[in-house]
Image: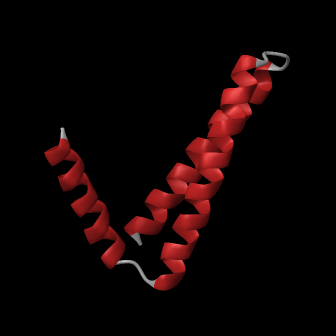
């Protein structure tokens, strides 16, 4: 298990080395937003008052992840 984590870490490190400072910052901000959205999603799943809210959080997470991939592919 450790070797797969290490190789995954190396892949992320190599990708990060090809990004400029602005791109790295954008990705960092998006990752923070994803983390926040996941926390809100978890809370929304526990409190099922509004099912549309869960879908909205899932969509926002997917949008942020897509934005990260777009930045990495530039």
Quarter of the image with the N terminus is: top left
Instruction: Check the image and name the residue furthest to the right.
Output: 49
Where residue 26 sits in the image (x, y, percent)? 57, 70
Where residue 71 sits in the image (x, y, percent)? 47, 67
**Residue that appears at 27% across and 58% down:** 9
Where residue 43 sits in the image (x, y, percent)? 73, 28
- Quadrant hosting residue 2: top left
Would you place residue 32 above or below residue 5 in this image? below
**Residue that appears at 54% across and 58% down:** 67
**Residue that appears at 60% across and 47% down:** 35
Quarter of the image with the C terminus is: bottom left
Would you place residue 34 above or below residue 68 in this image? above
- Quadrant hosting residue 25: bottom right
- The front one of 2 and 37 is 2
Would you place residue 6 above or below residue 10 in this image? above
Instruction: Check the image and name the residue furthest to the front.
Output: 2
Where residue 4 sits in the image (x, y, percent)? 18, 45
Q: Does residue 20 appear left or right of residue 30 in this picture?
A: left
- Quadrant hosting residue 29: bottom right
Q: Does residue 7 appear left or right of residue 31 in this picture?
A: left
Instruction: Check the image and name the residue furthest to the top.
Output: 48
**How many badges with numbers are in the image?**
0
Image coloring type: secondary structure
Instruction: Check the image and name the residue furthest to the left.
Output: 3
């Amino acid at each position: 298990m450790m070797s797969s984590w290490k190789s995954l870490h190396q892949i992320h490190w190599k990708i990060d080395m090809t990004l400029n400072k602005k791109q790295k910052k954008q990705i960092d901000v998006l990752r923070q937003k994803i983390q926040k959205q996941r926390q809100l999603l978890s809370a929304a799943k526990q409190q099922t008052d509004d099912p549309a809210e869960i879908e909205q959080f899932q969509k926002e997470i997917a949008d942020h992840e897509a934005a990260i991939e777009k930045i990495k592919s530039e």
